[in-house]
């Protein structure tokens, strides 16, 4: 089995000590959330991840979360223009939906594809109940699995290294990068170590 991964979802909400299993991967976002909540991470072996040092040129993970929320809000606004969808009282557009990344609980990926040694988790946070587009979070550990898209999808990488395998080669997304995968694409989702990203799909009800 792959190494355990400690994400922001695993960090306790109250301050105190949180014991990290020896050899586990602690994501940069999990470290940021722990610091903000006053939680001390007690690790079997201290580790330092690239980009976590002060003054790093990589944008902070919490800044990326804010940028992603702004991007998704803009996509939803443009995607609903001129189309029918959920509306509020008096025919007004539905209210803007805000999803706090730290409140999202990921679940095991509900579709076939990932191998037994690869951990894949996901959570839908914008659905067909909200409008014509959907969005959510997905994480995966080392490995890859095939996927055919019956919809259009945008992926915004938050952490790690996302590899999208195509017939023309592999596209590698790093934190802050955006990938667009058009409908009908046959790809592989993969990473050499760890990846966390936001996906935005159209239409929202692609799974039926």
Image: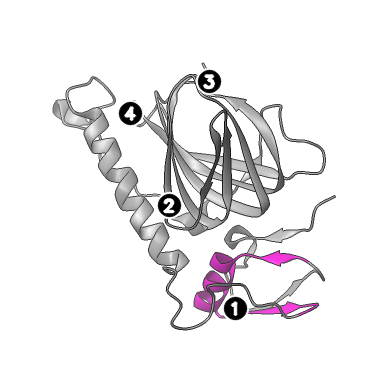
- Asked if marks 3 and 1 touch (Cβ < 8 Å), the reply is no
Disc 1 residue crowd, few under 14, some 14–19, many 20+, Cα 10 Å: some
- Asked if marks 4 and 2 touch (Cβ < 8 Å), the reply is no
What residue does disc 4 label?
131
Residue 12 picture quarter:
bottom right
Disc 3 residue crowd, few under 14, some 14–19, many 20+, Cα 10 Å: few
Left or right placement of residue 121 versus residue 90 in this view: right
User: Which residue is more in the foreground, 103 or 121?
Assistant: 121
Q: Secondary structure at mark 1?
A: loop
Task: For marks 4 and 1, give the one nearer the viewer.
Answer: 4
Disc 4 residue crowd, few under 14, some 14–19, many 20+, Cα 10 Å: many
User: Which residue is more in the foreground, 8 or 149?
Assistant: 149
Work out whether residue 34 can be spotted.
yes
| Residue extent of the magenta highlight | 24-45
* Above-or-below relation of 180 to 178: above
What residue does disc 2 label?
177
Residue lying at 55% horizontally and 41% vertically, measured from the top left: 123
What residue does disc 3 label?
207
Q: CA distance from mark 4 to mark 1?
A: 37 Å
| 38 magenta-colored | yes
Task: For marks 3 and 1, give the one nearer the viewer.
Answer: 3
Q: CA distance from mark 2 to mark 3?
A: 26 Å
């Amino acid at each position: 089995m792959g190494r355990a991964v400690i994400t922001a979802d695993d960090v306790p909400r109250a301050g105190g000590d949180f014991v990290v299993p020896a050899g586990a991967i602690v994501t940069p976002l999990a470290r940021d959330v722990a610091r903000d909540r006053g939680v001390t991470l007690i690790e079997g072996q201290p580790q330092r991840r690239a980009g976590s040092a002060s003054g790093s040129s990589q944008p902070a993970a919490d800044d990326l979360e804010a940028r992603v929320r702004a991007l998704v809000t803009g996509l939803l606004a443009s995607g609903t223009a001129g189309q029918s969808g959920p509306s509020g009282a008096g025919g007004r557009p539905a209210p803007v939906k805000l999803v706090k990344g730290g409140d999202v609980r990921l679940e095991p990926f509900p579709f076939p594809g990932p191998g037994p040694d690869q951990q894949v988790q996901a959570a839908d946070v914008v659905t067909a109940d909200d409008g014509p587009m959907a969005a959510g979070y997905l994480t995966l550990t080392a490995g890859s699995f095939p996927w055919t898209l019956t919809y259009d999808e945008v992926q915004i990488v938050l952490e790690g290294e996302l590899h999208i395998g195509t017939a023309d080669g592999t596209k590698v997304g790093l934190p802050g990068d955006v990938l667009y995968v058009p409908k009908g694409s046959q790809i592989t989702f993969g990473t050499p170590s760890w990846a966390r990203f936001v996906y935005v799909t159209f239409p929202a009800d692609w799974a039926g």
